[in-house]
Image (tube, rainbow, N blue to C red):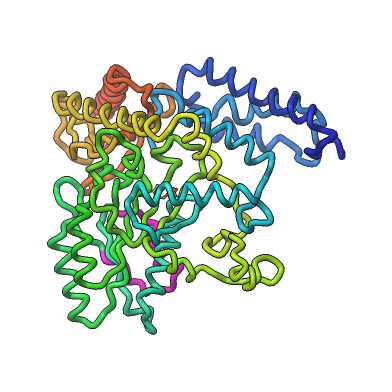
Amino acid sequence: MRSHLLNDTTAERYRRSVTEGVERVAAKLATTDRPFTGVTVDALAPRIDAIDLDQPLRDTTAALDELEEVYLRDAIYFHHPRYLAHLNCPVVIPAVLGEAVLSAVNSSLDTWDQSAGGTLIERKLIDWTAARIGLGAAADGVFTSGGTQSNLQALLLAREEAKSEDLARLRVFASEAGHFSVKKSAKLLGLGPDAVVAIPVDHDKRLQTIALAHELERCAEAGLVPMAVVATAGTTDFGSIDPLPEIAGLCERYGAWMHVDAAYGCGLLASLKYRDRIDGIERADSVTVDYHKSFFQPVSSSAVLVRDATTLRHATYHAEYLNPRRMVQERIPNQVDKSLQTTRRFDALKLWMTLRVMGADGIGSLFDEVCDLAAEGWKLLAADPRFEVVVEPSLSTLVFRHIPATVTDPAEIDRANLYARKALFASGDAVVAGTKVAGRHYLKFTLLNPETTTADIAAVLDLIAGHAEQYLGESLDRAS
Ligand SMILES: *Cc1c(COP(=O)(O)O)cnc(C)c1O
């Protein structure tokens, strides 16, 4: 069994084994003609159930053959141009190469003595990102597992900086289109059930600053503490960007921590055309960025950035065995002092390889392409009487629904759209998402693949209309 350990004597086995896996994936990429096979849970679960984990195959090729059956064949492939559903991007090759290197070397970024150069590379990427945001010379941050953890850490810092004895008096303001991790974080941070105040959005799904000003004033009058305002730079559902400069002004006026959740919109930090859409982000106290959404990085790759490095001390704890206090005096860079995690992946390497091979402009131009594609898609939808589209895109999301020519019952229109999404998924021809707008069911394209064309969008819209009309036709038959 020692021959399976990665070390000096197994270098050749490592090369063969990993190459065999890479060959399988490469073959898959070359031949996948649909984003999904349409496999059902009932069909797949027994195949996985039947495997006895206490009976190893003792052979890499056999294990890969089995993997083909239980995973690779029916996986959802984000690289396919008709995968249009969630905030998943196709990944760039330099980042995948970084992933292969980081998992083989297996550095852990908690302490210098477990990573060395990895620590400095992560730090340099944090500085690079903070500079792109414009956070100033005192900025810092750390890589995280994702936007959820970044938001949690940012709100932890905000809670500590609010310096309130009574957690029940703290209030966090976020738009009603903000991410649910804000509410989860509030719960984890011990805030009261009413802590998160949902601010209404305007027609374009952007936080209404007049309503925010009103709520901040009410908060002050009631003797409550405005702990933080979460501005979303790219809402998950619409890609809408809250008015950052106005929100920054209100945060200054009421002494609230300004957190910008740019999990999605961070791609604009590298944009050649649309960077101005997130102007004002430089005034944030903290920022969430998900490189695994709009920097074409594999999951996970995310970071939280702060304007004032000293605020990260709220996440600092010392353990004699790991990062004793004296190491701070000795200026030994231990990233665990800044992180909610202890053992932590060297995810930064993926972004490093990406920037070293492609450059930031390379990433930014890919994101610009999907933003342009969304603008084209919006025009298609707006001109098509079969569909109704909401919110002209600020990023790369389109929310729309099929409006049948002959049916007016809103519940029936809802059912037709729900059916179309399910039928499309079951066919595997395309994968789209869904959401609700004003209580009604809508469909959603999150466009993150520069390989997707307007012809793909038009074809998928035809498929959706076809499924919806089929449902309505059958529904008429049922009624008569
Ligand atoms: C995706 C998303 C998150 C959560 O990020 P994860 O990486 O999925 O944890 C938070 N906020 C916004 C706006 C998002 O789109």
Q: Residue at x 36, y 81 (%)?
A: 164
Counting the numbered discs, the total is 0
Q: Position of residue 274 (x, y in %)?
A: 25, 37
> Compared to 233, does 371 lie above or below?
above
Q: Residue at x 35, y 36 (%)?
A: 433
The verdict on residue 346 being magenta is no
* Residue 155 left/right relative to 277: right
Q: Position of residue 55 (x, y in %)?
A: 81, 37
Q: Position of residue 222 (x, y in %)?
A: 21, 81
- Depth check: give the residue in front, 287 or 219: 287
Please indicate, yes or no, whether residue 412 appears anywhere in the rendered image. no
Image quadrant where one finds the N terminus? top right
Question: Which span of residues is magenta-colored?
Answer: 178-197
Q: Residue at x 34, y 57 (%)?
A: 136
- Depth check: give the residue in front, 329 or 90: 329
Image quadrant where one finds the C terminus? top left
The verdict on residue 189 being magenta is yes
